Amino acid sequence: MELQEGLKRFSLAGRIAVITGSSSGIGFALARGLASVGATVVLNGRNEEKLARAAAQLRAEDYQIHTSAFDATSGDSVEAAIGQIEQEIGPIDILFNNAGMQRRAPLEEFPEDQWHELMRTNVDSVFLVAKAVALRMIPRRRGKIINICSVQSELGRPNIAPYTASKGAVKMLTKGMAIDWGKHGIQVNGLGPGYFKTELTAALVNDQVFTDWLVARTPSRKWGDVEELTGAAIFLASDASNFVNGHILYVDGGVTAML
């Protein structure tokens, strides 16, 4: 009986969750994880066909799924989409800011236009979507916002200095959001993935030299599987984390613990 009562705090039944950048990869895994514990999930991306395929796959598993195609880097697009979701689907209880991108080059050769593109995608989108959602959560005095950070919020690697800068900014923006919005009953936390096998990391997974280095560098001695992120995501999205605020939860196999 006590176990059942405890598990209820992890249930997302009756909650509406929006996940940006969720038609594939980590965002899609998060959507499946949240839906598996009862959440109604709104998938987001800019490619409507890709969104439709992702939604169909999850609906085939009997999950409650909606889609909303909008550009998370455009304030006008974000405001219109969030307003439509609230009006047509219901009040947003949970937001995962997952939209992001990577560009690799030596810093001295990094093009200015790619710097701005990366910052718009990785940082501006977090601010714009969180603000639009928080403005609706504040009067309700409840809500969960989870920003996807990275081990690169703490650690650098060659040729990704702009990405590292962007994820460091997301970490500190998460803390700032928690400070400003905590008084309104909103918890804002970060989820920091390590190295996970996704479509975007396939080339690195298949690079034996890199994989050997990574496995040796990771205390858990493996690449992460995206399903291994969902437990932490459910915790941060649920009532189980109601007194957790401004925290970055790293799910990285121990990479950030090891020199």
Image: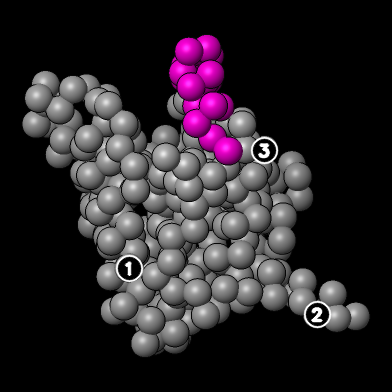
Q: Is residue 42 magenta?
A: no
Which mark's residue is nearer the viewer, 1 or 3?
1
Q: Residues within 10 Å of mark 3 (few under 14, many from 20)?
A: some
Tell me which residue sits at (54%, 27%) in the image. Answer: 216
User: 108 or 139: which is nearer to us?
Assistant: 108
Q: What residue type is disc 1 on? A: Lys
Q: 125 left or right of 198?
A: left
User: Disc 1 marks which residue?
Assistant: 175
Q: What residue type is disc 2 on? A: Glu
Magenta stretch prevailing secondary structure:
helix
Separation (CA) of disc 3 from disc 2: 31 Å
Furthest-front residue in this view: 259
Position of residue 143 measured from the top left corner of the image (x, y, whole percent): 48, 75
Tell me which residue sits at (50%, 31%) in the image. Answer: 217
The quadrant the N terminus occupies is: bottom right
Tell me which residue sits at (30%, 55%) in the image. Answer: 170
Q: What residue type is disc 3 on? A: Gln
User: Disc 3 marks which residue?
Assistant: 57
Checking the image for residue 5, the label placed there is 2
First along the sequence among labels 3 and 2: 2
Which residues fall within the magenta stretch? 203-219
Q: Residues within 10 Å of mark 2 (few under 14, many from 20)?
A: few
The kind of secondary structure element at disc 3 is helix
Relative to residue 184, is residue 111 depicted above or below? above
